[in-house]
Image: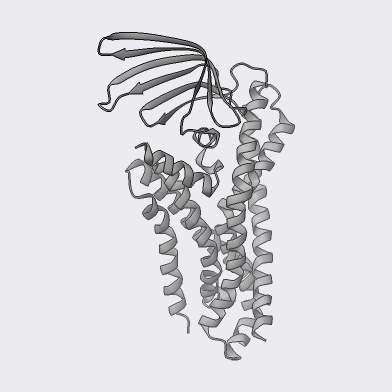
Amino acid sequence: MTSILSQYLMRTIILTTVLVLVVLLALAGLFEFIGELDDTQGSYQTPRVILYVALRLPNLAFEMLPVAALIGSLLGLGAIASNSEIIVMRSAGLSITRLSGMVSVAGLVMLIFTGLVGEFIGPPLDLYARNMRMEARYEKGDARLGKETWVKDGPVYLHLERVNSEFEFGSIYMFRFNDDYELAAIAKAENSGLDPDDNWILENLRETRFERGGVQVVESSVAVESFEVNAELLGSSLAKPLSLSARGLLVYIDYLKRNNLDADLYESELWYRASRTTTVLIMPILALAFVFGSIRTGGTGGRLMVGVIIGLAYYLGSETLANSGQVFNLNPALVNWLPTLALCMVTLIALSRVR
């Protein structure tokens, strides 16, 4: 009997959550589409805009799943409570703790789904969408296509003037420093790129070395350098944090810390994903606490309003704290987990008040 009730609750919660998520994604996709229409250029016209928005939907779904889970759980459990089915379950001997465990099964399923979307589906599609958008706007043959960037490899700083999806960099400048942080050499290569073994191939390299006895100039038509920065790390440096998988974030954070560079932005994104994924598990339990109150006798509109208010408060609170943490240099883990911990406390307090 318990397994049947658990499956019934899980099916109800997941179904209503999916319906809510579809509505939220439709609205978010519409706003995204309207915003992109102002940036049409080159071959990036309405069909490409639609494709771009469609590819970004998984990342948008990841961001909206906690709110969708709360509203969906409130609507699903509220409908069950309105039919007095939860009262019957309580009369049959099911405790609040047992019911919480049942609805948490639905939360666990949604948590797994959220984790898969946030790790394997959303980031790679988002990265592809942004590269497609850039290539369509500036055309593949445009010499400007690509991004310039700075990377650090121990005592060497590299300035790449143009990095495209094939990892062809155009001109590259290298600045080498000694152990006393004094400039030891400056070099420029007219063209550069990475070979399949992640070796740096530098063409028409001209290096000026500053030595105690004077200045030495070394020229080479082709030079091969080996840096720690490979294609994966370079791609991570060019991508937005939300376009990286959790593994990519961990690898890049490790690289930044080993080179004494600021990793707060990427750490914040990593903890943000972890906390947001965990929140999906909490939302059905929080909704269960509310359906025992006055909301049980209210209509769908009342339940929807409660879900929207709590969801907006959580979303705005988490976004504000995450941005404030970067501005005021606060601990990324603390500021990103604080809203989730607050939500846990609200859930425990609300459940403790249920009779």
Q: How is the image coloured?
A: one colour
Q: Quadrant of residue 79?
A: bottom right
Q: Residue at (42%, 44%) from the top-left corner?
A: 254
Name above or below for residue 242 compared with residue 224: below
- Image height check: is 11 above or below 19? below
Tell me residue 3's x, y (percent).
66, 81
The residue positioned farthest toward the bottom in the image shown: 92
Rendered view: 32 above or below 1: above
Q: Considering depth in this image, is 9 or 225 the residue closer to the camera?
A: 225
Whether residue 186 is visible here, answered yes or no, is: yes
Indicate the position of residue 333 as horizontal and vertical percent values.
Answer: 39, 53
The foreground one among 216 and 31 is 216
What x and y, as percent, mark residue 71? 59, 63
Quarter of the figure with the N terminus: bottom right
Q: Please give left or right for residue 159 compared with residue 56 in the image.
A: left
Rendering coords of residue 335 (x, y %): 38, 53
Residue depicted at x 44% and y 64% = 343
Q: Please identify the quarter of the rendering in which residue 106 is found.
A: bottom right
- Could you tell me if residue 40 is visible in this image? no
Residue for point 37% across, 45% down: 324
